[in-house]
Amino acid sequence: MIAVTDLKKVYRQATREVRALDGVALTVPDNSVHGVIGQSGAGKSTLVRCIALLDRPTSGVVEVNGTDLTAVRSADLRRARRRLGVVFQHANLFDSRTVADNVAYPLELAGVGRAERASRAAELLGLVGLAENADAHPAQLSGGQRQRVGIARALATDPDVLLCDEPTSALDPATTGEILDLIAALKARLGLAVLVITHEMTVVKRICDSVSLLEDGRVVESGPLTEVVGAFGSRLSESLLALPPAAGADSAEGGTVEVLDVGRDGELSALTTASRHFGVDFPVVAATVERLAGTTFGRWRVQVLPPLSPDEVVGYFSANGVQAGVTATTGSVR
Amino acid sequence: MIDFLTQLAANPVVTNALWPAFLETLLMVGVSGVATVVLGLPVGVVLFVTQPGGLAHNRPVNVVLGSVGVNITRSVPYAILMLSLVPFTRWIVGTSIGPIAASVSLTIAAVPFFARLVEAALREVAPGKVDAAHAMGSTRFQTVWKVLLPESAPALVAGVTTTVVTLIGYSAMAGLIGGGGLGRLAYNYGYQRFQPDVMVLILVILVVLVQLVQWAGDAVVSKVDHR
Ligand SMILES: Nc1ncnc2c1ncn2[C@@H]1O[C@H](COP(=O)(O)OP(=O)(O)OP(=O)(O)O)[C@@H](O)[C@H]1O
Ligand SMILES: [Mg+2]
Protein backbone atom coordinates (compact mmCIF):
# COMPACT_ATOMS: atom_id res chain seq x y z
CA MET A 1 0.00 0.00 0.00
CA ILE A 2 1.13 3.54 -0.73
CA ALA A 3 -0.06 6.37 1.48
CA VAL A 4 1.07 9.91 0.75
CA THR A 5 0.17 12.67 3.18
CA ASP A 6 0.50 16.42 2.67
CA LEU A 7 3.46 16.03 0.35
CA LYS A 8 5.21 19.26 -0.57
CA LYS A 9 8.17 19.88 -2.82
CA VAL A 10 9.58 23.34 -3.39
CA TYR A 11 12.35 23.86 -5.93
CA ARG A 12 14.36 26.95 -5.11
CA GLN A 13 15.75 28.67 -8.13
CA ALA A 14 17.89 31.77 -8.28
CA THR A 15 15.04 34.26 -8.33
CA ARG A 16 11.90 32.31 -7.48
CA GLU A 17 10.43 29.25 -5.82
CA VAL A 18 8.57 26.58 -7.75
CA ARG A 19 5.95 24.76 -5.69
CA ALA A 20 6.02 21.56 -7.71
CA LEU A 21 3.93 19.71 -5.10
CA ASP A 22 1.68 21.68 -2.81
CA GLY A 23 0.14 19.33 -0.27
CA VAL A 24 -0.61 16.14 -2.17
CA ALA A 25 -2.44 13.31 -0.43
CA LEU A 26 -3.34 9.99 -1.95
CA THR A 27 -3.70 6.34 -1.06
CA VAL A 28 -3.20 3.31 -3.26
CA PRO A 29 -4.45 0.05 -1.69
CA ASP A 30 -2.89 -3.30 -2.57
CA ASN A 31 -4.12 -4.99 -5.71
CA SER A 32 -5.24 -1.75 -7.33
CA VAL A 33 -4.06 0.77 -9.89
CA HIS A 34 -4.26 4.47 -9.13
CA GLY A 35 -3.76 6.90 -11.99
CA VAL A 36 -2.41 10.41 -11.59
CA ILE A 37 -3.25 12.54 -14.56
CA GLY A 38 -2.32 16.14 -15.22
CA GLN A 39 -0.95 18.50 -17.77
CA SER A 40 2.70 19.14 -18.45
CA GLY A 41 4.26 20.86 -15.46
CA ALA A 42 1.51 19.76 -13.06
CA GLY A 43 4.08 17.99 -10.89
CA LYS A 44 3.52 14.37 -11.96
CA SER A 45 7.17 13.41 -12.32
CA THR A 46 8.02 15.27 -9.14
CA LEU A 47 5.39 13.17 -7.34
CA VAL A 48 6.97 9.91 -8.48
CA ARG A 49 10.47 11.17 -7.70
CA CYS A 50 9.40 12.18 -4.22
CA ILE A 51 7.60 8.90 -3.52
CA ALA A 52 10.65 6.95 -4.71
CA LEU A 53 12.83 9.35 -2.68
CA LEU A 54 14.87 10.15 -5.79
CA ASP A 55 14.17 13.72 -4.70
CA ARG A 56 13.71 14.52 -1.04
CA PRO A 57 10.26 16.02 -0.35
CA THR A 58 10.31 19.42 1.32
CA SER A 59 7.73 18.10 3.79
CA GLY A 60 5.10 15.41 4.10
CA VAL A 61 4.94 11.68 4.61
CA VAL A 62 5.45 8.88 2.08
CA GLU A 63 4.42 5.54 3.51
CA VAL A 64 5.00 2.27 1.73
CA ASN A 65 3.50 -0.66 3.63
CA GLY A 66 3.45 1.44 6.74
CA THR A 67 7.10 2.56 6.63
CA ASP A 68 7.64 6.29 6.29
CA LEU A 69 10.34 6.50 3.63
CA THR A 70 11.11 10.13 4.42
CA ALA A 71 12.20 9.09 7.91
CA VAL A 72 14.70 6.37 6.95
CA ARG A 73 18.21 7.01 5.67
CA SER A 74 21.06 5.37 3.76
CA ALA A 75 21.16 1.60 4.26
CA ASP A 76 17.60 1.41 5.61
CA LEU A 77 16.33 3.48 2.71
CA ARG A 78 18.12 1.25 0.22
CA ARG A 79 16.54 -1.79 1.83
CA ALA A 80 13.12 -0.12 1.86
CA ARG A 81 13.48 0.58 -1.84
CA ARG A 82 13.45 -3.13 -2.59
CA ARG A 83 9.78 -3.12 -1.59
CA LEU A 84 9.15 -0.56 -4.31
CA GLY A 85 9.67 -0.94 -8.08
CA VAL A 86 9.96 2.01 -10.43
CA VAL A 87 9.16 1.92 -14.15
CA PHE A 88 10.44 4.89 -16.15
CA GLN A 89 9.13 6.49 -19.33
CA HIS A 90 12.22 5.52 -21.31
CA ALA A 91 12.86 2.27 -19.38
CA ASN A 92 16.37 3.51 -18.44
CA LEU A 93 17.96 0.10 -19.03
CA PHE A 94 21.71 -0.34 -18.80
CA ASP A 95 23.03 -0.71 -22.35
CA SER A 96 26.23 -2.39 -21.22
CA ARG A 97 24.32 -5.33 -19.73
CA THR A 98 22.30 -8.05 -21.39
CA VAL A 99 18.57 -8.15 -20.84
CA ALA A 100 18.95 -10.89 -18.22
CA ASP A 101 21.71 -8.98 -16.43
CA ASN A 102 19.55 -5.85 -16.40
CA VAL A 103 16.78 -7.78 -14.69
CA ALA A 104 19.31 -9.34 -12.31
CA TYR A 105 20.80 -5.98 -11.29
CA PRO A 106 18.56 -5.38 -8.24
CA LEU A 107 19.24 -8.98 -7.14
CA GLU A 108 22.97 -8.33 -7.43
CA LEU A 109 22.54 -5.39 -5.07
CA ALA A 110 20.56 -7.56 -2.69
CA GLY A 111 23.43 -10.04 -2.56
CA VAL A 112 21.63 -12.90 -4.32
CA GLY A 113 24.00 -15.57 -5.70
CA ARG A 114 24.77 -15.93 -9.38
CA ALA A 115 22.81 -19.12 -10.05
CA GLU A 116 19.73 -17.87 -8.25
CA ARG A 117 19.94 -14.53 -10.05
CA ALA A 118 19.99 -16.27 -13.40
CA SER A 119 16.97 -18.45 -12.65
CA ARG A 120 15.01 -15.55 -11.15
CA ALA A 121 15.81 -13.35 -14.18
CA ALA A 122 14.65 -16.11 -16.52
CA GLU A 123 11.44 -16.47 -14.53
CA LEU A 124 10.78 -12.70 -14.62
CA LEU A 125 11.48 -12.50 -18.34
CA GLY A 126 9.00 -15.32 -18.85
CA LEU A 127 6.47 -13.31 -16.86
CA VAL A 128 6.77 -10.36 -19.26
CA GLY A 129 6.96 -12.56 -22.35
CA LEU A 130 10.62 -12.02 -23.21
CA ALA A 131 12.17 -15.38 -22.28
CA GLU A 132 13.81 -15.62 -25.71
CA ASN A 133 15.59 -12.27 -25.44
CA ALA A 134 17.56 -12.94 -22.26
CA ASP A 135 20.95 -12.68 -23.94
CA ALA A 136 20.14 -9.71 -26.18
CA HIS A 137 21.32 -6.20 -25.38
CA PRO A 138 18.70 -3.48 -24.82
CA ALA A 139 19.67 -1.73 -28.08
CA GLN A 140 18.45 -4.78 -29.98
CA LEU A 141 14.92 -4.50 -28.56
CA SER A 142 11.90 -2.44 -29.60
CA GLY A 143 10.58 0.29 -27.31
CA GLY A 144 7.77 -1.96 -26.08
CA GLN A 145 10.17 -4.81 -25.36
CA ARG A 146 12.51 -2.46 -23.50
CA GLN A 147 9.61 -1.34 -21.34
CA ARG A 148 8.81 -5.00 -20.60
CA VAL A 149 12.39 -5.48 -19.44
CA GLY A 150 12.03 -2.34 -17.31
CA ILE A 151 8.92 -3.84 -15.71
CA ALA A 152 10.64 -7.20 -15.12
CA ARG A 153 13.58 -5.38 -13.52
CA ALA A 154 11.26 -3.34 -11.30
CA LEU A 155 9.67 -6.58 -10.09
CA ALA A 156 12.93 -8.44 -9.47
CA THR A 157 13.01 -7.91 -5.72
CA ASP A 158 9.37 -8.89 -5.30
CA PRO A 159 8.11 -5.41 -4.45
CA ASP A 160 4.62 -4.72 -3.14
CA VAL A 161 4.44 -1.38 -4.86
CA LEU A 162 5.04 -0.33 -8.46
CA LEU A 163 5.53 3.31 -9.48
CA CYS A 164 5.23 4.03 -13.20
CA ASP A 165 6.10 7.46 -14.61
CA GLU A 166 4.48 7.73 -18.03
CA PRO A 167 5.26 4.09 -18.83
CA THR A 168 3.65 4.23 -22.26
CA SER A 169 4.22 7.81 -23.41
CA ALA A 170 7.01 6.78 -25.76
CA LEU A 171 5.03 3.91 -27.30
CA ASP A 172 2.55 3.55 -30.16
CA PRO A 173 -1.13 2.85 -29.36
CA ALA A 174 -0.99 -0.92 -29.94
CA THR A 175 2.14 -1.34 -27.80
CA THR A 176 0.64 0.99 -25.19
CA GLY A 177 -2.31 -1.40 -24.92
CA GLU A 178 -0.01 -4.41 -24.49
CA ILE A 179 2.06 -2.77 -21.78
CA LEU A 180 -1.03 -1.59 -19.91
CA ASP A 181 -2.55 -5.07 -20.05
CA LEU A 182 0.72 -6.47 -18.74
CA ILE A 183 0.72 -4.04 -15.82
CA ALA A 184 -2.90 -4.88 -15.03
CA ALA A 185 -2.20 -8.62 -15.20
CA LEU A 186 0.85 -8.32 -12.94
CA LYS A 187 -1.13 -6.26 -10.47
CA ALA A 188 -3.78 -8.95 -10.21
CA ARG A 189 -1.24 -11.77 -10.06
CA LEU A 190 1.08 -10.22 -7.50
CA GLY A 191 -1.44 -8.08 -5.63
CA LEU A 192 0.58 -4.92 -6.33
CA ALA A 193 -0.31 -1.38 -5.38
CA VAL A 194 0.39 0.42 -8.66
CA LEU A 195 0.69 4.16 -9.14
CA VAL A 196 0.62 5.19 -12.79
CA ILE A 197 1.49 8.72 -13.86
CA THR A 198 0.17 9.72 -17.23
CA HIS A 199 -1.22 12.47 -19.37
CA GLU A 200 -3.20 10.04 -21.52
CA MET A 201 -6.85 9.34 -20.80
CA THR A 202 -6.56 5.92 -22.45
CA VAL A 203 -4.24 4.79 -19.65
CA VAL A 204 -6.78 5.77 -17.02
CA LYS A 205 -9.66 4.17 -18.90
CA ARG A 206 -7.84 0.92 -19.49
CA ILE A 207 -6.27 0.03 -16.15
CA CYS A 208 -7.06 2.44 -13.34
CA ASP A 209 -9.31 1.58 -10.41
CA SER A 210 -9.03 5.09 -9.05
CA VAL A 211 -7.66 8.37 -10.35
CA SER A 212 -6.44 11.78 -9.22
CA LEU A 213 -6.26 14.94 -11.24
CA LEU A 214 -3.13 16.91 -10.45
CA GLU A 215 -2.97 20.61 -11.23
CA ASP A 216 -0.23 23.01 -10.18
CA GLY A 217 0.97 20.56 -7.56
CA ARG A 218 -2.46 19.98 -6.00
CA VAL A 219 -4.92 17.12 -6.28
CA VAL A 220 -8.06 18.87 -7.51
CA GLU A 221 -10.20 15.78 -8.07
CA SER A 222 -9.75 12.23 -6.82
CA GLY A 223 -11.67 9.03 -6.26
CA PRO A 224 -12.62 5.62 -7.63
CA LEU A 225 -12.94 5.74 -11.39
CA THR A 226 -16.69 5.10 -11.45
CA GLU A 227 -17.22 7.86 -8.89
CA VAL A 228 -15.24 10.59 -10.61
CA VAL A 229 -16.63 9.73 -14.04
CA GLY A 230 -20.13 9.59 -12.57
CA ALA A 231 -19.79 13.07 -11.10
CA PHE A 232 -21.57 15.25 -13.63
CA GLY A 233 -19.55 18.26 -14.69
CA SER A 234 -16.32 17.21 -12.97
CA ARG A 235 -13.15 17.81 -14.97
CA LEU A 236 -12.25 14.12 -14.97
CA SER A 237 -15.75 13.14 -16.04
CA GLU A 238 -15.64 15.60 -18.92
CA SER A 239 -12.16 14.50 -20.02
CA LEU A 240 -12.79 10.78 -19.70
CA LEU A 241 -16.12 11.08 -21.50
CA ALA A 242 -14.89 13.60 -24.03
CA LEU A 243 -17.45 14.75 -26.56
CA PRO A 244 -16.50 15.23 -30.18
CA PRO A 245 -16.52 18.89 -31.19
CA ALA A 246 -19.98 19.77 -32.50
CA ALA A 247 -19.64 22.66 -34.87
CA GLY A 248 -22.31 25.35 -34.82
CA ALA A 249 -24.53 23.49 -32.37
CA ASP A 250 -24.44 26.18 -29.72
CA SER A 251 -25.97 28.76 -32.03
CA ALA A 252 -28.92 26.51 -32.70
CA GLU A 253 -32.38 27.63 -31.77
CA GLY A 254 -33.43 26.94 -28.17
CA GLY A 255 -30.66 25.63 -25.94
CA THR A 256 -28.58 22.59 -25.24
CA VAL A 257 -28.71 20.28 -22.28
CA GLU A 258 -26.20 17.69 -21.20
CA VAL A 259 -27.18 14.43 -19.59
CA LEU A 260 -25.04 11.82 -17.84
CA ASP A 261 -26.35 8.27 -17.89
CA VAL A 262 -24.67 5.97 -15.40
CA GLY A 263 -24.89 2.17 -15.48
CA ARG A 264 -27.86 1.78 -17.78
CA ASP A 265 -26.85 -1.44 -19.44
CA GLY A 266 -29.77 -2.78 -21.40
CA GLU A 267 -32.10 -0.15 -19.94
CA LEU A 268 -33.61 2.81 -21.70
CA SER A 269 -31.43 5.88 -21.86
CA ALA A 270 -32.68 8.73 -19.67
CA LEU A 271 -33.01 10.60 -22.90
CA THR A 272 -35.61 8.22 -24.30
CA THR A 273 -37.61 8.37 -21.10
CA ALA A 274 -37.56 12.18 -21.19
CA SER A 275 -38.50 12.23 -24.84
CA ARG A 276 -41.56 10.09 -24.11
CA HIS A 277 -42.44 12.20 -21.10
CA PHE A 278 -42.37 15.51 -22.97
CA GLY A 279 -43.63 14.06 -26.23
CA VAL A 280 -40.85 15.74 -28.23
CA ASP A 281 -37.58 14.69 -29.82
CA PHE A 282 -34.26 15.87 -28.51
CA PRO A 283 -31.86 16.15 -31.44
CA VAL A 284 -28.45 14.84 -30.34
CA VAL A 285 -25.65 17.33 -30.88
CA ALA A 286 -22.84 15.17 -29.50
CA ALA A 287 -22.61 11.95 -27.53
CA THR A 288 -20.20 9.40 -26.17
CA VAL A 289 -20.63 6.04 -24.49
CA GLU A 290 -17.84 4.29 -22.57
CA ARG A 291 -17.60 1.23 -20.43
CA LEU A 292 -15.22 2.04 -17.56
CA ALA A 293 -14.39 -0.19 -14.61
CA GLY A 294 -17.38 -2.37 -15.46
CA THR A 295 -19.92 0.45 -15.64
CA THR A 296 -21.41 1.95 -18.79
CA PHE A 297 -21.44 5.72 -18.96
CA GLY A 298 -23.33 7.74 -21.56
CA ARG A 299 -22.94 11.45 -22.01
CA TRP A 300 -25.37 13.22 -24.31
CA ARG A 301 -25.59 16.79 -25.42
CA VAL A 302 -29.00 17.42 -26.92
CA GLN A 303 -30.91 20.33 -28.31
CA VAL A 304 -34.04 21.55 -26.53
CA LEU A 305 -36.41 23.33 -28.84
CA PRO A 306 -38.97 26.00 -27.88
CA PRO A 307 -41.49 26.14 -26.40
CA LEU A 308 -39.75 23.67 -24.03
CA SER A 309 -37.03 25.39 -21.97
CA PRO A 310 -33.70 23.77 -21.09
CA ASP A 311 -34.34 24.45 -17.41
CA GLU A 312 -37.58 22.50 -17.53
CA VAL A 313 -35.82 19.51 -19.04
CA VAL A 314 -33.01 19.64 -16.50
CA GLY A 315 -35.59 19.87 -13.75
CA TYR A 316 -37.27 16.74 -15.03
CA PHE A 317 -33.97 14.83 -15.07
CA SER A 318 -33.04 15.94 -11.56
CA ALA A 319 -36.42 14.89 -10.24
CA ASN A 320 -35.75 11.44 -11.69
CA GLY A 321 -32.27 11.10 -10.26
CA VAL A 322 -30.42 11.74 -13.53
CA GLN A 323 -27.57 14.23 -13.57
CA ALA A 324 -28.04 16.94 -16.17
CA GLY A 325 -27.28 20.59 -16.78
CA VAL A 326 -27.88 23.42 -19.20
CA THR A 327 -24.84 23.98 -21.42
CA ALA A 328 -26.22 26.73 -23.66
CA THR A 329 -29.23 28.95 -24.03
CA THR A 330 -29.74 31.28 -26.93
CA GLY A 331 -31.65 34.55 -27.08
CA SER A 332 -34.59 33.02 -28.87
CA VAL A 333 -35.91 31.25 -25.79
CA ARG A 334 -39.44 32.66 -25.08
CA MET B 1 64.70 4.10 -53.70
CA ILE B 2 66.42 0.71 -53.37
CA ASP B 3 69.65 2.60 -52.84
CA PHE B 4 68.03 4.65 -50.14
CA LEU B 5 66.80 1.53 -48.32
CA THR B 6 70.09 -0.41 -48.54
CA GLN B 7 71.96 2.64 -47.35
CA LEU B 8 69.53 3.00 -44.49
CA ALA B 9 69.79 -0.68 -43.59
CA ALA B 10 73.55 -0.38 -43.38
CA ASN B 11 73.46 2.76 -41.25
CA PRO B 12 74.77 1.87 -37.77
CA VAL B 13 72.25 4.23 -36.24
CA VAL B 14 69.52 2.01 -37.64
CA THR B 15 71.19 -1.33 -36.96
CA ASN B 16 72.36 -0.54 -33.46
CA ALA B 17 70.37 2.32 -31.96
CA LEU B 18 66.89 2.08 -33.48
CA TRP B 19 65.57 -1.00 -31.66
CA PRO B 20 66.66 0.09 -28.15
CA ALA B 21 65.24 3.55 -28.84
CA PHE B 22 61.97 2.03 -29.96
CA LEU B 23 61.79 -0.05 -26.79
CA GLU B 24 62.51 3.04 -24.70
CA THR B 25 59.62 4.84 -26.36
CA LEU B 26 57.32 1.88 -25.71
CA LEU B 27 58.47 1.77 -22.10
CA MET B 28 57.84 5.50 -21.56
CA VAL B 29 54.42 5.36 -23.19
CA GLY B 30 53.53 2.08 -21.48
CA VAL B 31 54.52 3.12 -17.97
CA SER B 32 53.04 6.58 -18.19
CA GLY B 33 49.93 5.25 -19.97
CA VAL B 34 49.17 2.75 -17.21
CA ALA B 35 49.95 5.29 -14.49
CA THR B 36 47.74 7.89 -16.19
CA VAL B 37 44.76 5.56 -16.36
CA VAL B 38 45.23 4.36 -12.79
CA LEU B 39 45.47 7.92 -11.43
CA GLY B 40 43.29 9.76 -13.93
CA LEU B 41 40.23 7.53 -13.71
CA PRO B 42 39.58 8.24 -10.01
CA VAL B 43 40.31 11.93 -10.51
CA GLY B 44 37.81 12.05 -13.39
CA VAL B 45 35.22 10.19 -11.32
CA VAL B 46 35.71 12.56 -8.38
CA LEU B 47 35.41 15.57 -10.70
CA PHE B 48 32.14 14.15 -12.01
CA VAL B 49 30.50 13.14 -8.74
CA THR B 50 31.45 16.34 -6.89
CA GLN B 51 30.06 18.67 -9.54
CA PRO B 52 26.99 20.74 -8.58
CA GLY B 53 23.99 18.41 -8.52
CA GLY B 54 26.28 15.39 -8.73
CA LEU B 55 26.08 12.10 -6.84
CA ALA B 56 28.30 13.41 -4.05
CA HIS B 57 28.29 17.12 -4.84
CA ASN B 58 31.02 18.89 -2.94
CA ARG B 59 31.93 22.35 -4.08
CA PRO B 60 35.29 22.75 -2.33
CA VAL B 61 36.62 19.43 -3.62
CA ASN B 62 35.31 20.11 -7.10
CA VAL B 63 36.79 23.59 -7.28
CA VAL B 64 40.16 22.64 -5.83
CA LEU B 65 40.55 19.56 -8.00
CA GLY B 66 39.03 21.07 -11.12
CA SER B 67 40.37 24.59 -11.22
CA VAL B 68 43.57 24.27 -9.24
CA GLY B 69 44.62 20.70 -9.93
CA VAL B 70 43.44 20.03 -13.42
CA ASN B 71 43.16 23.40 -15.13
CA ILE B 72 46.47 24.81 -13.92
CA THR B 73 48.41 21.68 -14.86
CA ARG B 74 46.72 21.61 -18.22
CA SER B 75 47.57 25.20 -18.99
CA VAL B 76 51.33 24.65 -18.54
CA PRO B 77 52.92 23.62 -21.89
CA TYR B 78 54.43 20.17 -21.66
CA ALA B 79 57.97 21.33 -22.52
CA ILE B 80 57.94 23.67 -19.51
CA LEU B 81 56.20 21.21 -17.19
CA MET B 82 58.80 18.59 -18.03
CA LEU B 83 61.73 20.90 -17.22
CA SER B 84 60.17 22.21 -14.04
CA LEU B 85 59.53 18.68 -12.81
CA VAL B 86 63.20 17.63 -12.97
CA PRO B 87 63.80 18.02 -9.18
CA PHE B 88 60.56 16.23 -8.38
CA THR B 89 61.45 13.38 -10.75
CA ARG B 90 64.87 13.04 -9.13
CA TRP B 91 63.21 12.83 -5.76
CA ILE B 92 60.75 10.14 -6.92
CA VAL B 93 62.93 7.83 -9.05
CA GLY B 94 66.41 8.99 -8.01
CA THR B 95 67.40 10.23 -11.44
CA SER B 96 66.03 12.52 -14.13
CA ILE B 97 67.51 10.45 -16.96
CA GLY B 98 65.95 7.50 -18.72
CA PRO B 99 62.51 6.36 -19.80
CA ILE B 100 61.24 5.70 -16.27
CA ALA B 101 62.19 9.21 -15.18
CA ALA B 102 60.51 10.64 -18.26
CA SER B 103 57.35 8.74 -17.38
CA VAL B 104 56.94 10.88 -14.26
CA SER B 105 56.45 14.13 -16.14
CA LEU B 106 54.50 12.36 -18.89
CA THR B 107 52.08 11.00 -16.30
CA ILE B 108 51.68 14.33 -14.54
CA ALA B 109 50.94 15.99 -17.86
CA ALA B 110 48.48 13.33 -19.01
CA VAL B 111 46.49 12.71 -15.81
CA PRO B 112 44.52 16.01 -15.93
CA PHE B 113 43.93 15.54 -19.66
CA PHE B 114 42.62 12.01 -19.19
CA ALA B 115 40.62 12.99 -16.09
CA ARG B 116 38.71 15.56 -18.17
CA LEU B 117 38.01 12.91 -20.80
CA VAL B 118 36.70 10.59 -18.05
CA GLU B 119 34.51 13.37 -16.69
CA ALA B 120 33.11 14.07 -20.16
CA ALA B 121 32.49 10.35 -20.74
CA LEU B 122 30.53 10.04 -17.48
CA ARG B 123 28.51 13.11 -18.32
CA GLU B 124 27.27 11.35 -21.44
CA VAL B 125 25.52 8.68 -19.37
CA ALA B 126 21.79 9.45 -19.36
CA PRO B 127 20.75 10.79 -15.91
CA GLY B 128 17.78 8.42 -16.01
CA LYS B 129 20.16 5.50 -15.63
CA VAL B 130 21.52 7.00 -12.43
CA ASP B 131 17.93 7.49 -11.21
CA ALA B 132 17.19 3.85 -12.02
CA ALA B 133 20.32 2.74 -10.15
CA HIS B 134 19.24 4.72 -7.09
CA ALA B 135 15.63 3.61 -7.26
CA MET B 136 16.83 0.00 -7.14
CA GLY B 137 18.82 0.75 -4.01
CA SER B 138 22.40 1.18 -5.28
CA THR B 139 24.95 2.86 -3.06
CA ARG B 140 26.85 5.74 -4.62
CA PHE B 141 29.86 3.50 -5.05
CA GLN B 142 27.74 0.83 -6.77
CA THR B 143 26.23 3.48 -9.02
CA VAL B 144 29.71 4.52 -10.14
CA TRP B 145 31.21 1.06 -10.34
CA LYS B 146 28.31 -0.98 -11.72
CA VAL B 147 26.49 1.63 -13.79
CA LEU B 148 28.40 4.80 -14.67
CA LEU B 149 31.73 3.20 -15.60
CA PRO B 150 30.31 0.24 -17.61
CA GLU B 151 27.80 2.51 -19.35
CA SER B 152 30.54 4.93 -20.37
CA ALA B 153 33.03 2.18 -21.32
CA PRO B 154 33.10 3.03 -25.05
CA ALA B 155 33.90 6.68 -24.35
CA LEU B 156 36.41 5.72 -21.65
CA VAL B 157 38.28 3.40 -24.00
CA ALA B 158 38.27 6.10 -26.68
CA GLY B 159 39.70 8.44 -24.04
CA VAL B 160 42.48 5.98 -23.23
CA THR B 161 43.32 5.76 -26.94
CA THR B 162 43.48 9.54 -27.30
CA THR B 163 45.63 9.76 -24.18
CA VAL B 164 48.10 7.13 -25.38
CA VAL B 165 48.40 8.85 -28.76
CA THR B 166 49.07 12.13 -26.97
CA LEU B 167 51.67 10.40 -24.79
CA ILE B 168 53.48 9.11 -27.89
CA GLY B 169 53.76 12.72 -29.03
CA TYR B 170 54.92 13.99 -25.64
CA SER B 171 57.38 11.10 -25.29
CA ALA B 172 59.34 12.45 -28.25
CA MET B 173 59.73 15.74 -26.39
CA ALA B 174 60.59 13.94 -23.15
CA GLY B 175 63.35 12.18 -25.05
CA LEU B 176 65.18 15.44 -25.51
CA ILE B 177 65.89 15.97 -21.82
CA GLY B 178 67.16 12.49 -21.18
CA GLY B 179 64.17 10.25 -21.64
CA GLY B 180 65.76 8.63 -24.65
CA GLY B 181 63.63 6.86 -27.19
CA LEU B 182 62.80 7.67 -30.79
CA GLY B 183 62.56 11.40 -30.10
CA ARG B 184 66.12 11.48 -28.86
CA LEU B 185 67.29 9.50 -31.88
CA ALA B 186 65.52 11.81 -34.30
CA TYR B 187 67.04 14.84 -32.59
CA ASN B 188 70.60 13.49 -32.37
CA TYR B 189 70.92 11.99 -35.82
CA GLY B 190 68.10 13.32 -37.91
CA TYR B 191 68.51 16.92 -36.77
CA GLN B 192 71.95 17.53 -35.28
CA ARG B 193 73.94 15.22 -37.59
CA PHE B 194 71.59 15.92 -40.45
CA GLN B 195 70.69 12.39 -41.54
CA PRO B 196 67.33 12.96 -43.24
CA ASP B 197 66.91 9.25 -43.95
CA VAL B 198 66.96 8.48 -40.21
CA MET B 199 64.48 11.29 -39.64
CA VAL B 200 62.10 9.91 -42.26
CA LEU B 201 62.38 6.40 -40.89
CA ILE B 202 61.53 7.53 -37.34
CA LEU B 203 58.62 9.56 -38.64
CA VAL B 204 57.25 6.50 -40.42
CA ILE B 205 57.67 4.38 -37.30
CA LEU B 206 55.81 6.94 -35.16
CA VAL B 207 52.99 7.26 -37.68
CA VAL B 208 52.59 3.48 -37.83
CA LEU B 209 52.69 3.24 -34.03
CA VAL B 210 49.96 5.86 -33.65
CA GLN B 211 47.86 4.12 -36.30
CA LEU B 212 48.22 0.79 -34.52
CA VAL B 213 47.21 2.27 -31.19
CA GLN B 214 44.20 4.00 -32.74
CA TRP B 215 43.16 0.86 -34.57
CA ALA B 216 43.48 -1.31 -31.46
CA GLY B 217 41.56 1.29 -29.42
CA ASP B 218 38.76 1.44 -31.97
CA ALA B 219 38.57 -2.35 -32.02
CA VAL B 220 38.11 -2.42 -28.24
CA VAL B 221 35.50 0.35 -28.42
CA SER B 222 33.36 -1.58 -30.88
CA LYS B 223 33.69 -4.62 -28.65
CA VAL B 224 32.42 -2.83 -25.53
CA ASP B 225 29.82 -0.69 -27.31
CA HIS B 226 26.40 -2.34 -27.16
CA ARG B 227 24.33 0.71 -28.05
N1 LIG C 1 14.87 19.94 -10.61
C1 LIG C 1 14.00 20.96 -10.72
N2 LIG C 1 14.37 22.23 -10.43
C2 LIG C 1 13.49 23.25 -10.53
N3 LIG C 1 12.22 23.12 -10.91
C3 LIG C 1 11.77 21.88 -11.22
C4 LIG C 1 12.65 20.75 -11.14
N4 LIG C 1 11.93 19.66 -11.51
C5 LIG C 1 10.70 20.10 -11.80
N5 LIG C 1 10.59 21.43 -11.62
C6 LIG C 1 9.37 22.25 -11.82
O1 LIG C 1 8.33 21.64 -11.11
C7 LIG C 1 7.13 21.69 -11.86
C8 LIG C 1 6.59 20.29 -12.04
O2 LIG C 1 7.46 19.55 -12.88
P1 LIG C 1 7.22 18.02 -13.26
O3 LIG C 1 8.37 17.56 -14.04
O4 LIG C 1 6.87 17.26 -12.04
O5 LIG C 1 5.94 18.11 -14.20
P2 LIG C 1 5.18 16.95 -14.99
O6 LIG C 1 3.79 16.98 -14.53
O7 LIG C 1 5.91 15.67 -14.84
O8 LIG C 1 5.26 17.44 -16.48
P3 LIG C 1 5.46 16.61 -17.83
O9 LIG C 1 4.12 16.06 -18.20
O10 LIG C 1 5.90 17.64 -18.81
O11 LIG C 1 6.48 15.55 -17.58
C9 LIG C 1 7.46 22.40 -13.15
O12 LIG C 1 7.09 23.76 -13.01
C10 LIG C 1 8.96 22.27 -13.26
O13 LIG C 1 9.49 23.37 -13.94
MG1 LIG D 1 6.92 14.28 -16.24
Image: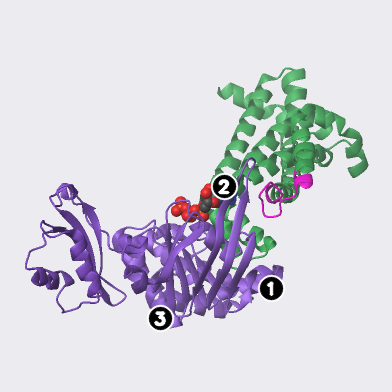
User: Please, is residue B184 above or below residue A197 in the view?
Assistant: above
Q: Measuring 52% from the left and 70% from the top, which residue is drawn there? A: A85
- Which label belongs to residue A118? none
Q: Amino acid at mark 2?
A: Glu
**Residue A318: image x %, image y %?**
25, 71
Regarding mark 3 in the picture, which secondary structure is present there?
A: helix
Give the chain letter at badge 1: A
Left or right side of A147 for A156: right
Residue sitting at the far front: A334
Q: Is B218 left, or right, of A224 in this rendering?
A: right
**Percent coordinates x, y for residue B37 in the rendering:** 71, 48
Among numbered discs 3 and 1, the one appearing first in the sequence: 1
Whether residue A133 is in magenta: the answer is no
Residue B198 sits in which quadrant? top right
**Which chain is drawn using purple?**
A
| Mark 3 residue crowding within 10 angstroms, few (<14) / some (14–19) / many (20+) | some
Residue under label 1, please give it. A76
| B187 or A306, nearer to the observer | A306
Q: Residue at x 16, y 50 (%)?
A: A249
List the residue tagged with mark 2.
Answer: B124
The dot on residue A188 is 3
Asked if residue B223 shows in the view, the reply is no
- The answer to whether marks 3 and 1 sit on the same chain is yes
Residue B132 in the image: above or below residue B119: below
Q: CA distance from mark 3 to mark 2?
A: 39 Å
Q: Which residues are magenta?
A: B48-62
